[in-house]
Amino acid sequence: MATANLNRYHENIFRRSCAPSVQRQFGLVRPVFFRSCMARRKALTRTGTVIRAELQDPLRNAQAAVNTFLRRYDITSTGIGAMIVTGYCVYAHDQDPFTALGITFTATIIALKQLVQRTDRVKGVDVHPTEPWILANLYNGNVYIWNYMDQTLVKSFEVTELPVRASKFVARKQWVITGSDDMFIRVYNYNTMDKVKTFEAHTDYIRCIAISPTMPYILTSSDDMLIKLWDWEKLPLHDLQGWNCVQVFEGHSHYVMQVSFNPKDTNTFASASLDRTIKVWSLGQPTPNFTLEGHEKGVNCVDYFTGGDRPYLISGADDRLVKVWDYQTKACVTTLEGHAHNISSAIFHPELPIIVTGSEDGTVKLWHSTTYRLENTLDHRMERVWSLGYCKGSNCIAIGYDEGVVMLKIGRDEPVASMDNSGKIIWARHNEIQTVNIKALGADFEMVDGERLPLPVKDLGSCDLYPQSLQHNPNGRFVVVCGDGEYIVYTALAWRNKAFGSGLEFVWSADSSDYAIRESPSKIKIYKNFQEKHSVSLGFNAEGIHGGTLVSVRGSDFIVFYDWEGRVVRRIDVAAKSVHWSESGNTVAILGDSSFYILKYNKELVEEHFASGTAAGDDGVDDAFDLQAEVSERVRTCVWVGECFVYNNTAWRLNYCVGGEVTTVVHLDRPMYLLGYLAAQNRVFLIDKEFNIVSYTLLLSLIEFKARITAGELDSAMELLPSIPQVCGLRCVITDQHNSVARFLEAKGMLSTALQVATDQDYRFDLAVQLGDLEVAQEIAVTLDSTAKWKQLGEMALTAGKLDLAAECLTRASDFSGLLMLAAARGDRTGMAAVAAAATAGGKTNVAFLASFLLGRLEDCLSLLLESHRLPEAAFFARTYLPSSISPALVKWKADLAAINPKAAEALADPAAYPNLFPHLEEALRAEKLLGQQRSNPVPASAYLDAVAVTAGSVEGGIERLLERLQVSECEEAEAMQEEAVEEEELMEEAEEAGEDDASVEVEAEAEEEPPALAPPPATAATPESSETEPAAEAGVEDEDEDPFGDPAGDGVPDAGNVAAEDLDDDWGLDGDGDGEA
């Protein structure tokens, strides 16, 4: 009871400490405990024992949980190399890490849950070969399809009310086939959800369905002790939908629990029965070929080994044993013990060297398929395991439990492959080693970017261990294969064993004869010419080592560089996951989780330091490295090409970095992994998980050019420029290589050099603008003849004071506004006239009007207003500047307005009919005539001061008197405004004293300010005396009945098509539409 309470207490602490997302990701929810530390230490020495971690401290995340466990119980010193976070517990396993699964070492999560779905009892699972789908058939009669990538339910089928014990995908027909306890086989189309076929297949429960990989066959097994072969293309009698029972296999004396086709010979299959036997059959023969006996209780499952040439099959039974059989010798190869209850499922994984077994004890065990060693035990606390599923070409495992289904991804997708400097590629398919050679394509072969290379594959041999990694040494003579805590060095040509040994990791030196191994988490050994030379005790737990110019040893949050004599060169506090040296050894890339760093190695300084005999200290030589660049991208795979770092990131973009500048080569359409670079072909080579080789162009001369620029060697870099072609490849044409160089130079601040190198005219124009080189920019603009370019160049010329060039550019750009401004600033009447004419022709009426107005061409201004149908503006313009033209403009206005509002048109007064309404009209006509004469003799801007003096001389009293009159006018206007303000204040005070509110005061003030109504035209023009009285009286009467100025309804809202009375008096400008513009 106390233990249970303690568990709940720590569970609550851990739940509060970990974010929900972390809990869901790693499943770290319920820590369980051993009673004492001594029990843990004893358990650590037992192979395959599960260690349950005691998490007593509040931990912020799952990684901290793993690290705390390692430090607290010193697991690394006992040989425990890996951690697994699965389900609800943290586990550790003994001896070597799970290297066969692509696992690195300490604190590594090797089984990543991709899907966890809680359901009723799951009796069977299957994985789709192409879609990210998992199929689960349930005891409650339902069948579900989940997408394990986005955790969504894709399809669901309500098959029957009885248990569905078997279901399978048939991807080539888009089918799902189910078998249930009602003895029926049902076939569904998983795209349309239609039921394709239903038929009674057996006389008892259907236990298993197996799909032939090559023929239109399925096998079904049942509790009626029969196995039946069905052909879905052969038509039975009286049925046109196929599904004929081709053959019935009899021979078992109890329930037939499972059948499985032999993937190496699809005409044979094996069956497992509760009669304690495994039988192997051939299609077309009624009796079994042979029977395998050895289990003491009923056999529940059987599966074939798919990889290599071993003729093995596996079986699991109620005797809690798993047996591996050789079906050629009919002997039991080995027996796997460890489960505490009946074995419900056992499989050979098709891609990984593991055997997976599931039991009713609730655990899934992973065994090495070569050594048969128990590697791990998974317990998701979902009760009994009933089924396991896999898919060829995938590292996933599907598990069906009493309480749901789990999808796990084990290991990595990256292929185990290596390429040497000559183009020879070696890769591992399981234990088989194969090779291809780029040179086999021939010199005349046309490589196309991104297309698969048709390389002939040659079998090189096999490996004695399952390869986790494979790597050439620098000169390509040897290849090292690592896995299972061991390494083997082979000759690259003949694939002969050169050396071998135990080690967690193996790395080559830049010198082809040196290498190092990580013998244990705290010790590394250095070899020269395959002889041990140095042994280095680290003093900390190493998570990994990396080779190259120096030996790099990774800690949890730092990395230590050693030379190949075992001396500390430098410690750098950075959480690294990998280290890669350039070929020259002068540069190193340190890769982190979210960014990578490019450092320069000061080799001469370090050698001088060691030669002087000065102690380096714990952190090594201070100035051993200089940071050159930091790039915030996560690197998946990488390779050095000279001083250029080529890599692909998590978004699967192929990039390269030179001098801190990142350039994207291509966006990859699928996951690809870098192999290497061949300078002779100027191409970088990549491989996918299906071992397809593709290549992309990457010019070595371009890389070398950028590297020299970064080093400050401009002259030598420019010597390489002619060797950089603008067109490279045969079918793949690349025309922007020089522009790529120019952009690199621009990023380095070398604009003038970039202008010389660039070939794209648009880009060269931008560079010339940045440099302020107007001549080059003008030449390019003439070539491009772009309005935007001419306008931009014109603005630059204006800024630089190059007015002639500006005028030319603005003319080519048809920038009439700019030309108007330029002509006005220069006092150029001829240019202004040209602007007016060009703007009129170009439809820019506003510019043409202003240019004509500045030239004094009032008649042209009026004509522009009339032609552009700005009739109100034309009338008011005539009233102000050309009173003799009022009547013609007014006639057109009234005719246009009459079509909209006749009453408003009638309200417009013509000075010819109502001269009394136009005071001083005669003086205006005389002034127009006088000014017209003066406009014919314009005064140049240079004579402005003289003209002012002449004008002032014509005034009585001279210029002094003129200024006094202007000042007096301003004073009188100010006094009038002040008196008006005082009167308004007095009115407000009187209104407050009378108790009137603000609203009434405003209404009265508005009423007092209303202008007098305009009198309509007289009845006849012959009686002008009556026109001053009678029309006004009539207007007063009309105002009471109907509003002639736009309010015919009399509701106080003016009609939108009419003109307000006040507008006739004060709108004398050019803004007839009220938008603030002429």
Image (cartoon, grey):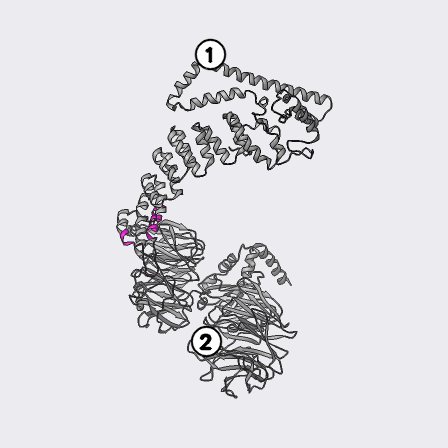
Using the image as rendered, state which of residue 61 and residue 253 is in the foreground. 253
Picture coordinates of residue 76, whole percent (x, y): 46, 62
Q: Give residue 956's mark.
A: 1
Residue 730 on the magenta segment: yes
Name of the residue lying farthest toward the right: 995
Mark closer to the chain start, 1 or 2:
2
Vertical order, 885 against 403 (above or below): above
The kind of residue on which mark 2 rests is Thr
Q: Give residue 75's mark.
A: none
Q: Quadrant of residue 506?
A: bottom left
Q: Is residue 1003 left or right of residue 483?
A: right
Using the image as rendered, state which of residue 998 and residue 834 is in the foreground. 834
| Helix, strand or loop at mark 1 | loop
The kind of residue on which mark 1 rests is Glu
**Label 1: few (<14), some (14–19) or many (≥20) C-alpha neighbours in 10 Å:** few
| Helix, strand or loop at mark 2 | loop
Q: Which residues lie in the magenta part? A: 721-750
Using the image as rendered, state which of residue 546 and residue 840 is in the foreground. 840
Determine which residue is flagged by label 2.
306
**Label 2: few (<14), some (14–19) or many (≥20) C-alpha neighbours in 10 Å:** some
Instruction: Work out how far the residue at label 1 is from the one at label 2, CA to CA, in angstroms.
Output: 120 Å
Q: Are circles 1 and 2 on residues that touch, CB within 8 Å?
A: no
Picture coordinates of residue 669, whole percent (x, y): 43, 61
Give the position of the N terminus as an image quadrant.
bottom right
Q: Quadrant of residue 478?
A: bottom left
Q: Is residue 787 left or right of residue 982?
A: left
Picture coordinates of residue 676, whole percent (x, y): 35, 61
Q: Residue at x 45, y 84 (%)?
A: 329
Picture coordinates of residue 431, whole percent (x, y): 40, 72
Using the image as rendered, state which of residue 681 and residue 496 is in the foreground. 681
Vertical order, 425 against 539 (above or below): below
